[in-house]
Amino acid sequence: MIDLDLSDQIASLRSTFSDIRAVVDVERLEREIAELSEQAGAPDLWDDTENAQRVTSALSHRQADLKRVSEIEQRLDDLEVLVELALEADDADSAEEARQELAALEKTVGDLEVQTLLDGEYDDRAAVVTIRSGAGGDDATDFAEMLMRMYLRWAERHKYPVKVLDTSYAEGAGIKSATFEIDSPYAFGTLSVEAGTHRLARISPFGSADKRQTSFAAVEVIPVMEEAQAVEIPENDIRVDVFRSSGPGGQSVNTTDSAVRITHIPTGIVVSMQNEKSQIQNRAVAMRVLQTRLLLLKREEEAAKKKELAGTITASWGDQMRSYFLYGQQLVKDLRTGHEVGNPAVVFDGDLDGFIAAGIRWRKRGDDD
């Protein structure tokens, strides 16, 4: 007789899922999907391209949320049936299948539970991620490219659509900077805990033999804003430069001046875009990113002023939020949460969920204090 008593674990999983379902508010989701579907079906929808994109994107995101919840509910039902059949047939193979499905469901529900902690104003938005190399010469630009690949692989693992908006290649190895958009529900809330300074320590492949090199890269994560929420920018406040798109080593990959660089003169913020086909498209995307950064800057200044008036000015993120050690002790460690992985290769290949979940829970504890 097989030993297959999973009733307590399944009951606990159902209880957690019930709490998640209440937070997600399935009934509200269904109402919003119905309303958005009606808007998306309007014959004149694409007369206003920006509004059409907003409606279709919102509809897609909410449908994905509902599908995720519905699939978990169905899998829980199927698991109970599988356990019952395995016990009736005294089938060891079915029992093992049930155990594996329980483990998989525990991870899926755990991931969704973390998502329910993402209740910030913009947490449900898509994200624009920018990576910039810091101190460390060729090692830093190489590290920046390693981080870019890491986040793109993470998105690929989750089947999230990614659009690279701009890449500035270094003269030697790697990249000076890169900007890309991840278009999925809660991409901003999820990846916002990745923002900060990342540090790499390794034996440099670019310097003298056996010399340890420490290099740095900065990760910035901002939400994709709806047009109505973007700030107005006077034309006199910006300088627009156009140039040819370039590839690795500075080689030209475009024979026309389609790439665009916009400088916001009052703040010095610079946004470059070169991956769209036309100058008009690149300018539109660059303006959207600039507007978002200015809106967030305004909110940060307001928050800082409130903290100053209250007499408490403390940074919420340290200068170095994560360290990657590729010599001696092979280790990736988050300095805020203490979460660590002893295999840097899998982390650089996009296995970030453990770090992200720990970061979200860490941030939530800080918000609740």
Image (spheres, rainbow, N blue to C red):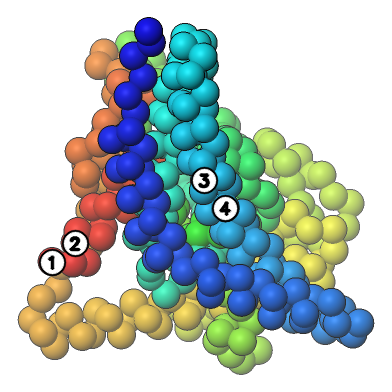
* Label pair 3/4, CB-CB below 8 angstroms: yes
Question: Mark 4 highlights which residue?
Answer: 70
Front residue of 304/29: it is 29
Q: Secondary structure at mark 2?
A: helix
Measured Cα–Cα span from mark 4 to mark 1: 34 Å
Classify mark 1: residues with Cα within 10 Å, few (<14), some (14-19) or many (20+): few
Question: Mark 3 highlights which residue?
Answer: 72
Amino acid at dot 1:
Asp
Classify mark 3: residues with Cα within 10 Å, few (<14), some (14-19) or many (20+): some
Amino acid at dot 2:
Gly
> Which residue is pictured at 56% across the width and 84% down the height?
229
Amino acid at dot 4:
Ser
User: Which-is-in-front pick, marks 1 and 3?
Assistant: 3
* Label pair 2/3, CB-CB below 8 angstroms: no
Using the image, tell me which numbered label, if any, was put on residue 173: none
Question: Mark 1 highlights which residue?
Answer: 369
* Label pair 4/2, CB-CB below 8 angstroms: no
User: Which-is-in-front pick, marks 2 and 3?
Assistant: 3
